[in-house]
Amino acid sequence: MKILVPVKRVIDYNVKPRVKADGSGVDLANVKMSMNPFDEIAVEEAIRIKEAGKAEEIVAVSIGPAKAQETLRTALAMGADRAILVQTDDEVEPLAVAKILKAIYDAEQPGLVILGKQAIDDDSNQTGQMLAALTGRPQGTFANTVELDGESVTVKREIDGGLETVKLTLPAIVTTDLRLNEPRYASLPNIMKAKQKPLDTKSPADYDVDTAPRLKTTNVSEPPVRQAGVKVADVDELVAKIKALGIA
Amino acid sequence: MKTLVLVEHDNASVKDATLATVAAAAKLGEVHLLVAGSGCGAVAEAVAKIEGVEKVHVADDPAYEHQLAENVAPLAAELMKDHDAFLAPATTTGKNIAPRVAALLDVMQISDILSVEGEKTFTRPIYAGNAIATVESSDLKLVITVRGTAFDKASAEGGSGTVEAVSGSGDAGISSFVGQELAKSERPELTSAKVIVSGGRALKDAATFEEYIMPLADKLGAGVGASRAAVDAGYVPNDYQVGQTGKIVAPEVYFAIGISGAIQHLAGMKDSKTIIAINKDEDAPIFQVADIGLVADLFKAVPELTEKL
Ligand SMILES: Cc1cc2nc3c(=O)[nH]c(=O)nc-3n(C[C@H](O)[C@H](O)[C@H](O)COP(=O)(O)OP(=O)(O)OC[C@H]3O[C@@H](n4cnc5c(N)ncnc54)[C@H](O)[C@@H]3O)c2cc1C
Ligand SMILES: Nc1ncnc2c1ncn2[C@@H]1O[C@H](COP(=O)(O)O)[C@@H](O)[C@H]1O
């Protein structure tokens, strides 16, 4: 079985994003970029499945600028076998990403696609579900555990009230939640080895996908800032403030 | 415009998030609801009474019992032939189903809207709420998920929608429900609680979390939340997590106890009316958003607070 893992290059999660003064977006010049944290979890899960002897090959895919190569090299250094960069400098929305992934899915015929549940830049939480719709395959979103058995995959999902378990016929689409696993760091020798692993470069046109955006962002602004309040000296003062709020 | 709102329910009662979604839909036009479930007649009757609802489409079929996206999405997509906008609450149920509907309709979904600015214009948070984008859709139909804390809930009473049975294609045959482990709690649900007491990594372990956080929450009749660090370390179950990738809450009063205030946590609670932080580090980022801060060791301060309230 082959596993397809889409990975997105995003702002590093430790960086506080700055909104551009002209309202055109978030300033990404000279900002540290990394693999979307949920996608690291996706790569890790794929590697564990392969290590357990249940998959033969892991293909990482990224849609983005030339620099997304670095993200793919990280996936390769972690343990993916080969990579596909669908290169474009345009911002590609989840629907178009899903369409490109559908074309790659058709070509590669994976048994499993593991995506992150959400990209921490657009916070869309859509691509996996959309890919599942386009391929007509089942989806195990917000996965907490993933268990493969021959024809099917059992996914325990993190839901608002707790956990839910679903069983999906393969091929299936899975999206990762935070507690699925803890991703490994790539070792130096593996980083060196990753440089030799195959990385194909394509364009959205190769897959006949129109990436023209459907949503026009007319403005990006800062959220209302909260003013820091007061510090109280001790618990008694805190009690007085809480009583003044009328909740106790 | 004719809207179709996905009702979130467990075949017996309606989840609160539905009411905020109805309020958002009402800003766009006529409100129709979709109740997909099994033995869900009572739910359909109940939601017909929500203020402003004109019609309830009810699909009662064992295939819809657990609202599997593979089965519900085609049903919703079919009904969308007669509607202009599909709205779902931005809960784990809505987030699971709506994008599947969007892709079937070849529509780019607008996730987690905060406001309706026009027929096709909405605001939504990006970058963990560190920026708010105004987006305008060019699609013929709209698919939207709605942030519950951003809209006043529609009243559960006062409407008189008609109930109409619909049938869909049923079981897609590619997925099945195995089981669920729902956290049972007598405490108010996080997304609708007026007061929330949240604990972080500082609470050490499950027993300590229980010992220090729960009595305070009980005293205040509060819901209990947690940071990711506390959930990852197993102090509390996953559904307690507040944040960018957990629950978005906006109670009257939010207590952050032993929580540093990482942007991912702030994303989930910074719209709370009053934030109270207890942290032993006076430079903890949480104090930058807290209305009331106490620099103290929580193991001393929290029992004293609980005692004195
Ligand atoms: C992709 C991604 C998504 C994430 N999503 C979320 C999310 O949804 N929600 C979330 O919460 N986090 C999320 N995080 C994690 C986030 O970045 C932080 O790691 C996390 O919020 C830290 O939790 P904490 O504040 O409990 O722990 P810490 O940062 O370790 O803070 C503990 C605090 O307790 C204080 N303290 C220690 N001992 C005491 C004491 N005795 N008395 C008083 N104070 C004390 C310390 O001063 C410190 O400020 C996410 C991270 C990533 C990468
Ligand atoms: N440009 C992209 N390239 C590769 N994978 C992507 C891209 N955009 C989204 N994804 C995948 O889809 C997941 C969800 O993204 P989103 O729907 O944008 O929140 C991410 O975690 C990735 O796994």
Image: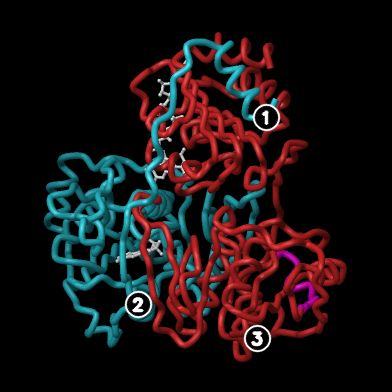
Chain colours: A cyan, B red
Amino acid of disc 1: Gly
- Seen at 78% across and 62% down, the residue is B156
Q: Secondary structure at mark 3?
A: helix
Measuring from the top left, give residue B307's x and y in whole percent: 69, 12
Q: Is residue A20 above or below residue A138?
A: above
Is the residue at mark 2 from the same chain as the one at mark 1? yes
Task: Give me the disc on residue B79.
Answer: 3
Name the front one of labels 2 and 1.
1
- Graded by Cα atoms within 10 Å as few (under 14), some (14 to 19) or many (20 or more), the crowding at tag 1 reads few
Counting the numbered discs, the total is 3
Q: Which residue is mark 2?
A: A96
Q: What's drawn in magenta, residue-wise?
A: B56-66
Task: Judge whether residue A21 can be spotted in this image.
Answer: yes
> Is A98 positioned to the left or the right of B15 in the image?
left
B91 magenta-colored: no
> Is B232 positioned to the left or the right of A184 in the image?
right
In this view, the residue farthest toward the front is A244
Q: Which residue is mark 1?
A: A246
Q: Secondary structure at mark 1?
A: loop
Closer to us: A145 or A32: A32
Measuring from the top left, give residue A146's x and y in whole percent: 52, 53
- Seen at 31% across and 45% down, the residue is A13
